[in-house]
Amino acid sequence: MRGGWARATRVVGVVVVLSVAWLQLALPPLPHDPQAALGGGARETPELDPAIIIHHSPASKFLQAKGKSPSSSEGSKLTAEQIQEIREQIQLRSGNETVLNEELFGPVQPDTIVIAVQVHNRLEYLRHLIVSLAQARDIDSVLLIFSHDNFDEDINQLVTTIDFCKVMQIFYPHSLQTHPDSFPGESPGDCPRNTKPEEAAKLNCIGSPDLYNHYREARFTQTKHHWWWKANKIFDDVWVLRNHTGLVLFLEEDHYVAEDFLHMLRLLSAAIPRACPKCSLITLGNYLKNYNFQIDGRKVEVTQWVSSKHNMGFAFNHSVWQQIKACSSQFCDHDDYNWDWSLLHVSSSCLPQKLHTLVLRAPRVFHIGECGVHHKKKDCSSRTVLHKVHRAIQVGQHTLFPRQLVVVHTPPKKVKKHKGNGGWGDKRDHALCRSFSVSTAPDSVMVNSSTLSTQVVGNNSVNGSAIVRSGS
């Protein structure tokens, strides 16, 4: 009997050993498997999907897609009734500045960090931005403002599910969505882009050409209008911010933040008086193709603000805004459809001192957008870029949340004067843009080409105002 038990024990042992061996052959090596790192075994460890990495995180709920609503139909033309309904919604929400989650996180304080996100219609990118914000430390202390130029029920629903901080939505009222057949959209009498001046005279069309003799294209003008309206709205027209003196951080829907971005923002703000008294801006992002958190995690550069390098994740306060706003004509009349290049023009031609910034060498704000106004690709998925961002953050994980900064003063480089990229020659755009410094209310201004004293033809300038104020 005793021999039978011994044989049974040996059989069970052999079965266990064979089972373990079979499992080792059947399963791929884990990412931390030293044999995989040394090249042992034929299998290659697959990269993890960023969505899988956060699958068990509470923030993963923001990645769950819902069915599209009628107002979110990409490319479909809205009916007159739908457009009118959207205008009414924007009017209603403009008069009711609701701060969501205020009962959970308390009222806005003068030094509360405000995060302003400019949103168009790229829902997938926006989901990832919100996930990254949800995972950031101290995010419950901020006011998160989404500024929309497209009224989309799916996006609105996503925003209202945010439960990790105070949230507000504002809506740019002069969008192409609500003005598809009139300025600032395309008007029936507008001069086509490539019209020659002599042809414009024969057509008797409306518009004035830019530096490169091209007439306005409505789809390229909206982003600059929206950015300037948003800045005026947040700094001067939002009631809960009437006493605000803290930083406003500017983000876009296709950005992604590291978990210590607020820590770095506060650290940089505290460093300005000693490290760079002339710096009026803080920049958390950059466009370096290669960055090393191990080496550069604590490093910050002092440099002149340049639009093509420092336009991602930058922040400034109300006193700086007052200086910029005083140069509204230089911003609004500059023949460049890009808001950042227009801001650079303000810096170089109007401000008492050019804008300088503290900028992180290892970014805490990343650009994940593959498609947008300037770029169109067959695959607009953010997955590839997200993989790179997640890997960079993961590798530099132990360098996040530094207690001190290392300030690097780079040799000053002369910033060439930029004449402008064009696309902003139409006097109606200049007038609409300037009007936002007076009021950002939906019904405060109306741009109507029929109010021009003379039509703008060829190279002729506008005589008379393109702006009609309500009640005038």
Image (cartoon, rainbow, N blue to C red):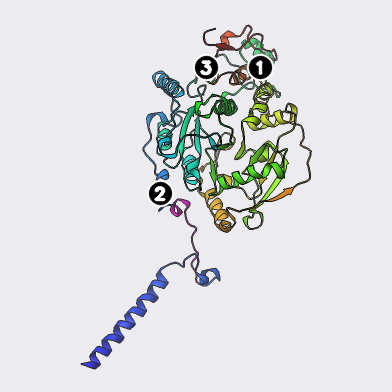
Q: Which residue position holds label 2?
A: 58
Residue type pointed to by label 3: Ser
Real-space CA distance between mark 1 and mark 3, rounded to the nearest whole angstrom: 16 Å
Relative placement, left or right, of 8 versus 184 is left
Residue 379 percent across, percent down from the top left: 51, 43
Q: Is residue 338 visible?
A: no
Q: Which residue position holds label 1?
A: 208
Dot 1 surroundings within 10 Å: few (below 14), some, or many (20 or more)?
A: many
Q: Residue furthest left?
A: 1
Residue 201 percent across, percent down from the top left: 66, 11
Pointer 1 and pointer 3: residues touching (CB < 8 Å)? no
Real-space CA distance between mark 1 and mark 2, rounded to the nearest whole angstrom: 52 Å
Residue type pointed to by label 2: Pro
Q: Residue 182 has which mark?
A: 3
- Residue toward you, 373 or 417: 417
- Residue 244 in the magenta stretch? The answer is no
Extent of the magenta region = 41-55
Real-space CA distance between mark 3 and mark 2, rounded to the nearest whole angstrom: 44 Å
